[in-house]
Amino acid sequence: MSKIKEIEQAVKNFTEEELRLFRRWFASYDGKAWDTQLESDVQLGKLDDLANSAIDAHQKGQSKEF
């Protein structure tokens, strides 16, 4: 059995309280992983084209204020 299948089975057997705690833990874990990836992408310039495109569109009056 793969690790993923083992985790799936374990989660299916959680009590409501265990599931609530797992969700909280996983949201935090996943958020930190996302932040780390985003910071890396910024440092590597992977978002530069997207940022420049947004700035260009804004300068052309093609953006909205929310």
Image (spheres, rainbow, N blue to C red):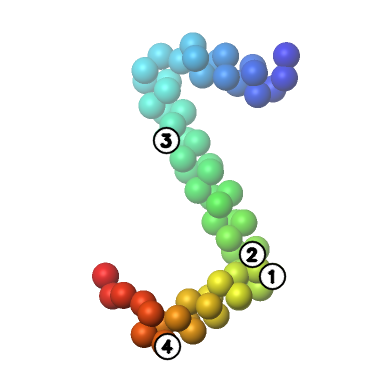
Instruction: Calculate the distance from the C-alpha at mark 1 to the C-alpha at mark 4.
Output: 25 Å
**Callout 2: SS:** helix
> What's the residue at 41%, 82% (across, down)?
58
- Callout 3: 10 Å neighbours few (<14), some, many (20+)? few
Say which amino acid is labelled 4: Gln
> What's the residue at 48%, 76% (across, down)?
54
Instruction: Calculate the distance from the C-alpha at mark 1 to the C-alpha at mark 2.
Output: 5 Å
Say which amino acid is labelled 2: Asp
**Callout 1: SS:** loop
Instruction: Calculate the distance from the C-alpha at mark 1 to the C-alpha at mark 3.
Output: 30 Å
From this view, report whether residue 17 is shown above or below residue 25: above
Q: Which residue is mark 2?
A: 41
> What's the residue at 60%, 70% (across, down)?
47
Say which amino acid is labelled 3: Arg
Q: Position of residue 30 (x, y in %)?
A: 53, 43
Task: Give the quadrant of the C terminus.
Answer: bottom left
**Callout 3: SS:** helix
Q: Which residue is mark 4?
A: 59
Q: In this orientation, which residue lies closer to the viewer: 60 or 1?
A: 60
